Amino acid sequence: MKDTTNPGFKKFNERNWKIVGELERVANELGRSMAQVAINWTANRPGVGSVILGATKLPQLEDNLGALDFEIPAKLRQSLDDVSAPPARFPYTFFASASDVQGMITGGAVIGDNPAGYAPVQLIDAKPAAMAKE
């Protein structure tokens, strides 16, 4: 399927190789199989309620079940999060770091910036009229 435009067949790309490389590095550092680290990481993602295992042989199943016996340290978990984070797509590109898109739309002001001459709201410490009689 070399010349296909079907994205299902385009899994051998630079991004995915980087993910596999980081997964291998983390697995080596932890002394675990790549399958164990991948399953552990996936099972502990926010919003994941279950993980489907793809074992076809008993040794594969035993290896996969070993994913439940350890915790991935935060630093290594973060490295897997970072390398596998999908690229921001519309509309999230509007909120990227000091977004160029925001600058084009607002003339240079970005989220959190105030326009020139902006004055913050002034709060007046006064009791409402009904309470003033007390």
Image (cartoon, rainbow, N blue to C red):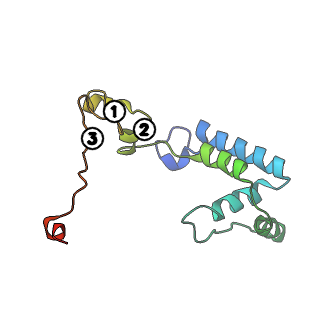
Q: Residue at x 51, y 38 (%)?
A: 3
Quarter of the image with the N terminus is top right
Q: Is residue 112 visible?
A: yes
Residue 15 is drawn in which quadrant?
Answer: top right
Q: Residue at x 72, y 41 (%)?
A: 21
Q: Contact (CB < 8 A) between labels 1 and 2?
A: yes
Provide the residue designation for mark 3: 120
Q: Residue 24: x and y, percent? A: 76, 46
Provide the residue designation for mark 1: 101
Few, some or many C-alpha atoms within 10 Å of disc 3 (few <14, some 14-19, many ≥20)?
A: few
- Between 2 and 77, the one nearer to me in the picture: 77
User: Please, what is the three-letter code of the amino acid marked with disc 3?
Assistant: Pro
Structural distance between the alpha carbons of marks 1 and 3: 26 Å
Structural distance between the alpha carbons of marks 1 and 2: 8 Å
Does dot 2 land on a helix, a strand or a loop? Answer: loop
Q: Is residue 13 visible?
A: no
Q: Which mark is residue 96?
A: 2
Q: Residue at x 21, y 62 (%)?
A: 127
Q: Is residue 19 above or below residue 35?
A: above
Q: Nearer the viewer, mark 2 or mark 3?
A: 3
- Between 78 and 126, the one nearer to me in the picture: 126
Few, some or many C-alpha atoms within 10 Å of disc 2 (few <14, some 14-19, many ≥20)?
A: some
In the rendered structure, which disc, 1 or 2, sits on the residue that comes first in sequence? 2
User: Please, what is the three-letter code of the amino acid marked with disc 2?
Assistant: Ala
User: Please, what is the three-letter code of the amino acid marked with disc 1?
Assistant: Val
In the rendered structure, which disc, 1 or 3, sits on the residue that comes first in sequence? 1
